[in-house]
Image: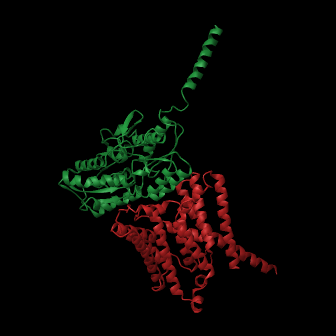
Chain colours: A green, B red
Amino acid sequence: MIKKLAKVAAAAIVGALVATAVTPASAAVPGIKTGLKIAIMPKAVNIGYFTAWDKGAQKACKEIGAKCTYLGPTEATGPAQVQFINKVIQQKYDVLVISAADQNAIVPSLKKAKAAGITVVTSDADVAAASASSRVVSVLPAASDRIGTAEVDWIAEAVGKKGSIAVLSASATAANQNAWIAAMGPYLTKKYPNMSWVGGTVEKSTFYGDDDATKSTAQFAAILSQYPDVAGIISPTTVGVLAAAIEKKAKNAKVKVTGLGLPSQMAPYIEDGTVEKVGLWNPIDLGYVAVYAAARAESGTFKGTVGSSFLAGKKTYKVTKGGVVFLGDPFTFTKSNIATFKAIY
Amino acid sequence: MKKKYTFGWDQGVTAFLAITVVVGSFVSEYFANFDNLSFVIQDIAEIAIIALAMTYLIIAGEIDLSVASILSLTSATIGFLFRNGTSFEMAIVGGLLVGLLCGLLNGYLVTVVGLPSLAVTIGTLALFRGLCYALLGNEPVNELPENWIVLGYENIPGTFLPWSTIPLAILAAIAWIVLHYTRIGRWTFAIGINPEAAKFSGIPVARMKLGLFAMTGLMSGVAGVVYTLRFASASPDGAVGFELSVIAAVLFGGVAIAGGIGTLWGVLAAVLSLGAIRSVLQLIDFSANALLVVSGALLLISVVVPRAIEIYQSRRKSAFVTKI
């Protein structure tokens, strides 16, 4: 009896040893080197949207067996990011995944990083189109005009398709917001003839909150005082739309608010009716796909040329014109589905 | 007595710089190499250039808080002119001229109208910053000529020194020689120690001060050119808060806030120390906010320590007298 037990035990031990020998300690993905040192750099570290973005990045890092560090400035400006890019170069990272706080100011440092052998991928916000060579690819949510025009649709729905509207943006140097806002102008004129911009054109109706809660709140108040008849405000940034919702509730203002909102942050304001609808893509996916693209490029199995594609987790993504990878259309969050999404991001 | 004290402070800052470098190389393996030195020089180049002029100004008993706004206005002017069709070279000349004019405005208000420089330059800080937005709106200028931008971020071929080292080295050498070896330098100290006595001994005090303000404006303009090339863009919100780093460096370098005392080497060592500390803290993953705290702490030390030494020395003197 004991002999039999001993045999079973021995077999079990051998089996376990074989199993640990066969499955590697960090489950790696074919085509990607393990042990890569990856820097994940948001526009600024204290923004909830980027915490979600990092969640996706860290998930990908675990799958590919890389060592990822989340680092960045506390103010979303180019010069502040440049200091951290220099640090990434100094500390000899292999890969940099970055959301560009300033589409121009960081380009020289990105070129330096590239020259030092670091693979650079932008995600969420890209560098200026003319400087696309400073990064391998850019992973962006959806085509700019679709994000901009969708937000116009949401505000039109909220104000009953008439009235004047304004925009509360992030910083004046952010490529992503600027591209979305540029698409809003002609679309409003074409589709909603009974609506207008408070300042005449969309450029004159855009206020900049610099992705800073205090400044965004002040700018919201400025819009209301300069244009007391404003019917709706679009805020294409999670910091801005949250500040606008808080301030609207506090001042009991009549203006309708919509924009790109993180469901976990906007849930209380959607549930109590302050805001009817916001939308967003999943920043977790943005971070996740970007890390895969960068890791594959660093491992030499993905060149980032237009038309090529790569596998991130279970889905394949294709590179379109200008070296951009699009994730897909944004979700919208209303009272009906906010409960589900607020738990996710 | 005063000369002895200045000499001591100078050695102190140099020692501080040396200690920072040594400690830095132990604390982070990424600190002590030429690449990092290149980054540090780039990081402090603009601050150093402005500090050269600010040294003279503070020694002469004045101050200029609008330097960061002048830097940004120069950058905005370059962007504005270039965007509207001027050649980049002429845009740079235009920018430097604007810097000079800003300095002259500050100087005029202080020497001719007779207003205190602290109040004047707080006002022009806001005025010049507002003009930046007036010139560029909210849209930065980003298509600058590639052959110029290269000077902003690359090193001199074959060395680890960034291109910005050249204007910095030349200006620093001139500033050092003029301050310590020429009549203008001696006049600057004289004005700072006692403006009335200086006037009565024939020194053109008002003209000198006007010139020092103009020079500060021009140097802020040069820093503005360097800044524009480094970030390959001209934007209206650049260099906010730089004036604090400049003044912190000048005071930490041994220049007395009351005027009349200081050396140029002290200021250069202080600027390098500031850059070195920032680099070390960055590389050991210190929070970005801590960097601001460090600059502030250095500023306080530079103001408190000299006063503490003064009190200690006067106590020693009185103790000696009572012993007799």
Residue B294 x/y as whole percent: 58, 61
Residue B212 x/y as whole percent: 52, 80
Kindly give the residue lying farthest to the left in the view shown: A193
Q: What residue is drawn where x is 44% and y is 55%?
A: A107
Q: Is residue B21 visible?
A: yes
Kindly give the residue lying farthest to the front in the view shown: B158
Residue B243 x/y as whole percent: 50, 69
Q: Quadrant of residue B264?
A: bottom right
Relative to A83, A232 lies left or right? left
Of the 4 image quadrants, the one containing the C terminus of chain B is bottom right
Q: Quadrant of residue B229?
A: bottom left
Relative to A282, A89 lies left or right? right
Q: Quadrant of residue B159?
A: bottom right
Of the 4 image quadrants, the one containing the N terminus of chain B is bottom right
For residue B273, above or below residue A265: below
Residue A102 x/y as whole percent: 41, 56
Q: Is residue A246 visible?
A: no
A21 or B277: which is nearer to us?
A21
Q: How many marks?
A: 0
Q: What residue is drawn where x is 45% and y is 82%?
A: B109
Kindly give the residue lying farthest to the right in the view shown: B324
A9 or B161: which is nearer to us?
B161
A69 or A131: which is nearer to us?
A131
Relative to B19, A127 lies left or right? left
